[in-house]
Image (cartoon, rainbow, N blue to C red):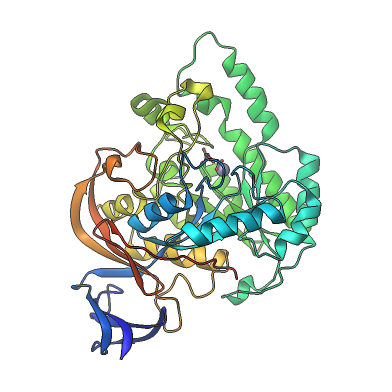
Amino acid sequence: MIDLCIKNCKISAENDLCSINIEQGKIIDITKIPLKAEKTIDAKGNLVLPGLIDVHVHFRDPGLTYKEDFKSGSESAANGGFTTILDMPNTIPPTNTVKNFQEKLKIASKKSIIDFGLHAGVSDLKEIEKITNLNPASFKIFMDTVNSSFLNEAFKAISELQKVENTDINKENNTKKPVITIHAENKDIVNHCTDQIKSKEENNPSDYALARPSVAEEVAVAQAIALANHYQTKIHFCHISTDKSLKMIKSSKSFLNNISSEITPQHLFLDSSSFKKFGNLTKTNPPLREYSEKISWENLSKIDLIGTDHAPHSIEEKKKGVWDSSPGIPNLEVVLKLLLTKYHAKKISLDSIKRLLCENPAKIFNLKNKGFIKIGMDADLVIIDLKREGIINSEEFYSKAHYTPFEGMTYNGAPIMTICRGKLVMENNDMYQNQGIHVYP
Ligand code: NCD
Ligand code: ZN
């Protein structure tokens, strides 16, 4: 008798229905006929994907828990079909010392209902060697907050580090060096342009995109590519917003093995015309771009992964005007629904959704046993009803942030069950208790 059998699963378009058999949180067999189990879930012929992985979330815990915390954030993730998240370091205190990293590990281990890893911040370069021993998902550098000399020193210092534990799952990626995760916006250009635009007599929400122009991102991308090449580091670009940035990253793959790009739902689905409709609600860093500059659906095949950059703030903080409102958008509970809707519109395939939200995140961030439905892997699964229709309603979010620029949009296709290491954590938007674990032990 096994622990759990999920029968009548459609795991790919070509294959017949199958049963996924689970023991101690792992997939032990995939069979035609269901095995005898203590608990059986009937997937009823629905699509089953590997549990989604979000490599870019801001759960605000500790320090900013009025915006989100590890419980609300992880429930929001489970509601969106995610079974693993990697949390960003810009909390209070920031995750940039061993002490703070350990403190956040404790909080997440207690509150997270799905599995998690933590990105580490980079400030005191003496700390990063010690943090490496705790296996951070990456070292995150916000280029909009540091100058070039620090950036150079940080790349150099990180390039000299070796990870203690090697959790590599694919051979091409088989070095123990930590990943550097980059927020690519050049600080000087952003500061200069912000001062210029602010000095205008009147400002409106779309001015934010002029204050942080495309060229600020593109200069930062070029600089980070040069540094990664010089110091031979792994590099991952967060929330790329322009087609030119993407082209640079794509062409540098000819000389850099470990370089990857991420796009957020807002940069994929929206453009700067949204400022008119949603005002500062769509304020985010980097800002939304003109339609002609943004990354098109046709170029999505060149992107390595989708990260939601789930960045919740209180609604009061979002309403403080062009300059004082907080940048960021909560996305965990909308991204899969939006993509499934685009699948029906023939803009994206189910295989691409799997590549962008399951397989590549696992490969790029060395998430052992995650991202694939295969024997031996963690039983992280999301069951999807491709025919479920509805309207995006932020009141239903588990996130503490109850707003979205996708409010009122009709969707077609939704996650109906989320299973993390063999435990049902979400069923039809209801949450079950579960204990997430650190994915880099
Ligand atoms: C993020 C946040 O709120 O923490 N905001 C954002 O607009 N993306 C920070 C970040 O990822 O840059
Ligand atoms: Zn960022």
Residue 301 falls left or right of residue 96: left
> Which quadrant of the structure image shows residue 426?
bottom left
Residue 156 visible in the displayed image: no
Q: How many marks?
A: 0
> Which quadrant of the structure image shows residue 117?
bottom right
Image location (x, y in percent) of residue 231: 78, 57
Image location (x, y in percent) of residue 336: 34, 54
Residue 157 falls left or right of residue 14: right
Q: Is residue 205 above or below residue 124?
A: above
Q: Is residue 312 above or below residue 278?
A: below
- Residue placed at 30% from the left, 91% from the top? 1
- Residue placed at 56% from the left, 46% from the top? 62
Residue 25 falls left or right of residue 174: left
Residue 374 falls left or right of residue 169: left
**Nearer the observer, 128 or 285:** 128
Q: Is residue 37 above or below residue 135?
A: below
- As drawn, the residue found furthest toward the top would be 201
Q: Name the quarter showing ligand 2.
A: top right
- Residue placed at 64% from the left, 63% from the top? 258
**Nearer the observer, 287 or 436:** 436
Q: Is residue 216 above or below residue 77?
A: above
Quarter that holds the C terminus: bottom right
Residue 330 visible in the displayed image: yes
- Residue placed at 50% from the left, 31% from the top? 326
> Which quadrant of the structure image shows residue 15?
bottom left
Image location (x, y in percent) of residue 63: 56, 42
Image location (x, y in percent) of residue 82: 40, 60
